[in-house]
Image (spheres, helix red, strand yellow):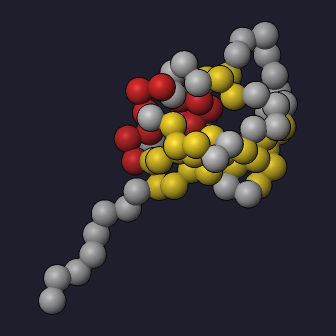
Amino acid sequence: MNFKINGEIKTIEKSNKEIQLEGLLERLGFKPQLVVVELNGAIINPKDWISTKIKDGDCLEVVTIVGGGSYS
């Protein structure tokens, strides 16, 4: 199965099991509590990650939340 994540084409072996968004993010090394995910142009609520299925040709954008900053 091929999909695009952050502009890069990724290929993973497709098993008989469906691939859920939550499992894919963990498999790719993202920390779920620190990312925002857009799937095919729509932001996906983290509560829906377990029920959201990834299909061949999907396009994901994953943005990592980074804390910090400075005070003047």
**Furthest-front residue in view?**
42
Q: In the image, is residue 33 above or below residue 20? A: below
- In the figure, residue 68 lies in which quadrant? bottom left
| Residue 22, horizontal then vertical, whole percent | 53, 29
Residue pictured at 45% horizontal, 42% vertical: 31
Q: Is residue 23 left or right of residue 12?
A: left
Q: Position of residue 15 (x, y in %)?
A: 79, 16
- Horizontally, residue 61 falls left or right of residue 70, namely right
Residue 30: tell me if it is visible.
no
User: Which residue reaches farthest top?
Assistant: 16
**Which residue is found at the position 40% from the left and 57% from the top?**
65
Q: Position of residue 19 (x, y in %)?
A: 67, 22
**61 relative position to 1: left or right:** left
Which residue ends up furthest to the left in the rendered image?
A: 72
Q: Position of residue 69 (x, y in %)?
A: 27, 75
**What count of labels does the image hold?**
0
In which quadrant of the rendered image does the N terminus lie? top right
Residue shown at the point (38%, 61%) measured from the top left: 66
State which quadrant residue 40 falls in.
top right
**Can the viewer see residue 19?**
yes
What residue is shown at x 47% (from left), y 55% (from top)? 64
| Placement of 62 over or under 22, stated as above or below | below
Q: Quadrant of the C terminus?
A: bottom left
